[in-house]
Amino acid sequence: MALVARVRALLLPGSRLRGATLGRAANGGGAGARRALSHRVLVEADPAAGVAVVKFRNPPVNSLSLEMLTELGICLEKLENDKTVRGIVLTADRPGIFSAGLDLTEMCGRNPAHYAEFWKAVQELWLRLYQSNMALGAAINGTCPAGGCLLSLTCDYRILADNPKYTIGLNETQLGIFAPFWFKDTMVNTIGHRATERALQLGLLFTPAEALQVGLVDQVVPEDQVQSTALSVMSQWLAIPDHARQLTKTMMRKATVDQLLKHREADIQNFVSFISRDSIQKVLQVYLQKLRKKNH
Ligand SMILES: CCCCCC/C=C/CC(=O)SCCNC(=O)CCNC(=O)[C@H](O)C(C)(C)COP(=O)(O)OP(=O)(O)OC[C@H]1O[C@@H](n2cnc3c(N)ncnc32)[C@H](O)[C@@H]1OP(=O)(O)O
């Protein structure tokens, strides 16, 4: 289902998005104005600085479910059309978990049409973020595996909280699945081929010190300074004339984007046939059960 159709579905009676404030809040904005764009994504815009802070709030772990992907996509589209916004900082509404990555329940026990719809939504969000004309920063205030790491890698820079409990990486192989080529390319573009090969094969989750060393993040700062640092770094990016920064960003990312655009349909089919395998379903179920068992 395309983004527009998914939005319509979300707005149907009974949907949790129905009735959410999708525009500017009644207070009309202003510096530091808080705008609730949906249930799962909060936006705090500072028009004077030209920056919006986009906060994930999809408890318990900010997983990227189909609804979360859709709401995030709507939110980003709105911000892209807002002339007062030139930069976005992505972060979690509450410290602890930036995002647990793709929602595993979307990839378990569903039918092929659902897998295709889900994967298309993952592709759409990546394309929107990776091609964004805005300057994007990640204020990583929590643990950041797999799809969570991918989100941060679409940004122009990453600031990670200095907490050894917070790890970051593409750990898919540890689950018995693997990162598709465009996840891999996004990481190669950040830390290089050799470091990516090692990280992906071993499914490494890096501590803050390791992530800094390998170049997965640009700065590690005390936990209470993640957002303020991300905002102050943003002002450096916004000091560059937009057109010059945007042309350079497009030049750097075009080849990677074109690969997915060229193989988009095949990539969906590949995902559907891989994830539908009995053996893959089994490993994902076991992984999910292990996560759930901790709590029961
Ligand atoms: C052709 C290519 C095919 C493959 C491509 C597929 C690519 C996939 C990329 C991905 O993103 S896969 C997801 C990978 N994510 C993870 O491995 C993280 C898993 N989660 C955790 O490690 C932990 O939950 C945490 C994030 C460290 C948080 O730990 P905490 O102790 O705070 O919370 P939990 O008790 O573990 O979890 C609470 C609750 O949430 C459920 N949950 C956790 N992660 C997910 C998830 N990714 N999707 C869905 N649900 C998740 C967990 O089961 C718990 O549920 P309940 O017990 O409350 O029912």
Image (cartoon, rainbow, N blue to C red):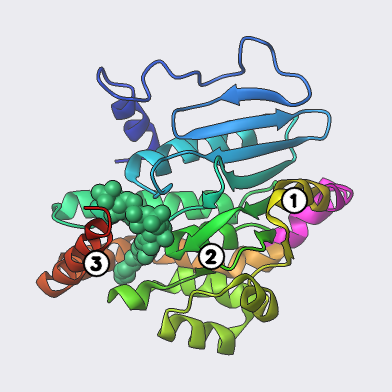
Q: Residue furthest top?
A: 26
Question: SS for tag 1?
Answer: helix
Dot 1 or dot 3: first in sequence order is 1
> Is 170 rendered above or below residue 156?
below
Q: Is residue 96 left or right of residue 276?
A: right
Is residue 74 visible in this depiction of the protein?
yes
Question: SS for tag 2?
Answer: loop
- Ligand 1, what quadrant? bottom left
Residue nearer the viewer, 195 or 57: 57
Q: Write down the residue under mark 2.
A: 165
Q: Write down the residue under mark 1.
A: 225
Q: Which amino acid lies under the numbered mark 2 shown in the image of this protein?
A: Lys
Is label 3 within 8 A of ligand 1 (CB to nearest ligand atom)? yes
Q: Is residue 173 left or right of residue 21?
A: left
Label 2, label 3: how many angstroms apart (C-alpha)? 20 Å
Q: Write down the residue under mark 3.
A: 287
Query: Pointer 2 and pointer 3: residues touching (CB < 8 Å)?
Result: no
Magenta stretch in the rendered image: 235-250
Is label 1 within 8 A of ligand 1 (CB to nearest ligand atom)? no
For the point 87% across and 48% down, which residue is it?
241
